[in-house]
Amino acid sequence: MNVAFGLILLFMCVFGVFLLQGGNSSILIEALPAEMAIILGSGIAALIIANRNDTPRYVLIALKRVIRGPKWSKKDNLDTIVLVYTLLKTLKTKGPKSIEEDIENPFSSKRFLEFPLLCRDKHLILMISDTLRVMVASTGALNPYAVEELMDARIAQASSHERHAFHALVALGGGLPALGIVACVLGIVKTMASIDEPPAVLGSLIGAALLGTFLGVFLAYGIVDPIAKRISQHIEDDAQLYYVVKQLIVASLHSHPEALIIESARVAISPRYQPTFDEVFDAMRNHRTTEPINND
């Protein structure tokens, strides 16, 4: 919603004010298709040349995310705390055998399937199950800091495609003004070939040529760069769910008290999506998970 409103306001402020000031719309209409083809076409070509084969596809996916908005909600964060807490509590109180089937086949596990929205994120579910498998398979004392490094690597891996899309759009935004100058120069070359035309005709040709410079700057700083920044914000928002998992597991490995384990996960969530302390404990109480993880 905010993106759509921002784009409408952008076009109103730029093109609406131009027309209100008596600007000639016919020059824009006539020159726009060719200028856009040169600038956007060469920009997309440069993006394809500079990136891996799958990057354009992930750019399109990231653009869809910008339109749809945040991937996770406050309830999803709450469900993640409940799910991971349940698994950790069961592992602590009933032993590795009690969750062996869950972590070996998480996508068919009843515990995981209680949270269908979370199961849509393959990286999230595998991060939970694989880390718990490491905990179960470790015969000696497990170093919490080593597990933390492992989970940080998984978090970075989960957002790698989105980050490629972000960097590709940043590079595209940085190159569009220069490509606008290219379009402008081509327009000037075309104008010079018509130097013997009347001033009115030359004025239209020069105006069309300068439109290339305008469009390059407009597309870069009005559309592409803000969208890239929005994608970066979505990457940060999406990663919060992974940090919730990390905080729960690492705090449990440190043998912190139950309340501290839960609070360390809750404060990893931004205030916009953060459940209250009471909401977390009410959710766990409803899920029958009030027994402590540790034997403190």
Image: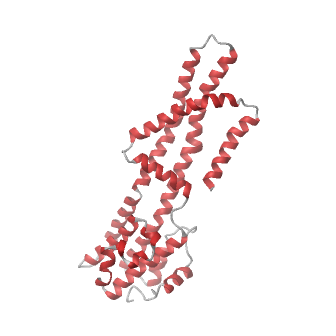
Q: Which scheme is used to colour this image of the protein?
A: secondary structure
Q: Residue at x 41, y 81 (%)?
A: 86
Q: Tell me where residue 256 appears, x and y as whole percent.
A: 41, 81
Dividing the image into 4 quarters, which one contains the C terminus? Answer: bottom left
Q: Quadrant of residue 133?
A: bottom left
**Residue 3 seen from this side:** yes
Q: Tell me where residue 16 appears, x and y as whole percent.
A: 71, 39
Q: Tell me where residue 223 appears, x and y as whole percent.
A: 57, 44
Tell which residue pokes out farthest to the left in this image.
139
Tell which residue pokes out farthest to the front in this image.
108
Dividing the image into 4 quarters, which one contains the N terminus? Answer: bottom right
Q: Residue at x 32, y 75 (%)?
A: 103
Q: Is residue 206 above or below residue 59?
A: above
Q: Is residue 99 above or below residue 152?
A: below
Q: Nearer the viewer, residue 5 or 142?
A: 5
Q: Is residue 26 above or below residue 241?
A: above
Q: Residue at x 40, y 67 (%)?
A: 124
